[in-house]
Image (cartoon, rainbow, N blue to C red):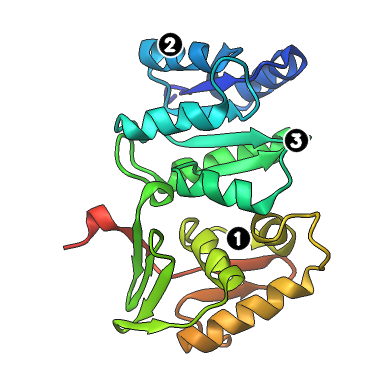
Amino acid sequence: MSEATKLLLADDEQAITDNLAPFLERSGFSVNVASDGEGALREIALHKPEFIILDVMMPRLNGREVLRRLRQGGNWTPVILLTQVGEAGERAMALQEGADDYLNKPFDPNELVARIRAILRRVQAGQLSLAGAHTLKSGELTLNRTTRRAYLHEHEITLTPKALNLLEYMMTRPDEIITRERLLDAVWGWDYPTGIRTVDTRVAELRRQLNDDSANPTYIETVLGEGYRFIGTVASASALP
């Protein structure tokens, strides 16, 4: 039997840690708990977890500051942020700072476990993850996350900001089926006055710009009844020549 993945859960709400930590342990993880950002950094230094869950709104140091310190120090342990912030821009900034994913409170613990396992399948311990990479490449497609520009066959393609954010979200989660509802939440935020058909419109925009045939896709696959999946192999800048 393989050793359980070591996980740190940092949240100042005891009602959450009291219920979530046992659930995570029943799901096969070894869990340590911290109640604030400073405590999280101490636990990380002491126990070296293989996965970290950070509440954004914690005392002493908030979750995003903990995340920034980890990434600035070269620690690329996968991180999921727990947030009550509905603003899509706030979440996009957190992802650009190196978070691997986030969940809005309240959330389904089963969804959290599914996200953790999906991230663990695509990251390698101690290495820069796709979420932390400045540049992503898949075949002839390149996305520069710093300049917010995309290129196909070394020629820049014109994308709306929402389409570019959608492409970024999918490229950092290759081979993962992502529902329209999740994409809507990630890119637009649920407070945005739109519906899930907006996601289809932006995916169609991406496909036109990428010359991607929906019937025989190179990049974006439609998964009937579920959502979309980025099927191209994605490499971070650190893996490129």
- Calculate the distance from the C-alpha at mark 3 to the C-alpha at mark 1: 22 Å
Q: Residue 104: x and y, percent?
A: 71, 40
Name the residue carrying label 1: 177
| Tag 2 and tag 1, C-beta contact below 8 Å | no
Q: Which residue is found at the position 48% from the left and 26% from the top?
A: 66
Quadrant showing the N terminus: top left
Q: Which residue is found at the position 68% from the left and 67% from the top?
A: 227
Name the residue carrying label 2: 42
Indicate the quadrant where residue 14 lies.
top right
Badge 1 density bin: few <14, some 14–19, many ≥20, Cα 10 Å = some
| Marks 2, 1: nearer the viewer | 2
Q: Residue 182: x and y, percent?
A: 69, 56
- Calculate the distance from the C-alpha at mark 2 to the C-alpha at mark 1: 35 Å
Going from N to C along the chain, the mark reached first, 3 or 1, is 3
Name the residue carrying label 3: 105
Q: Is residue 174 left or right of residue 75?
A: right
Q: Residue 17: x and y, percent?
A: 69, 16
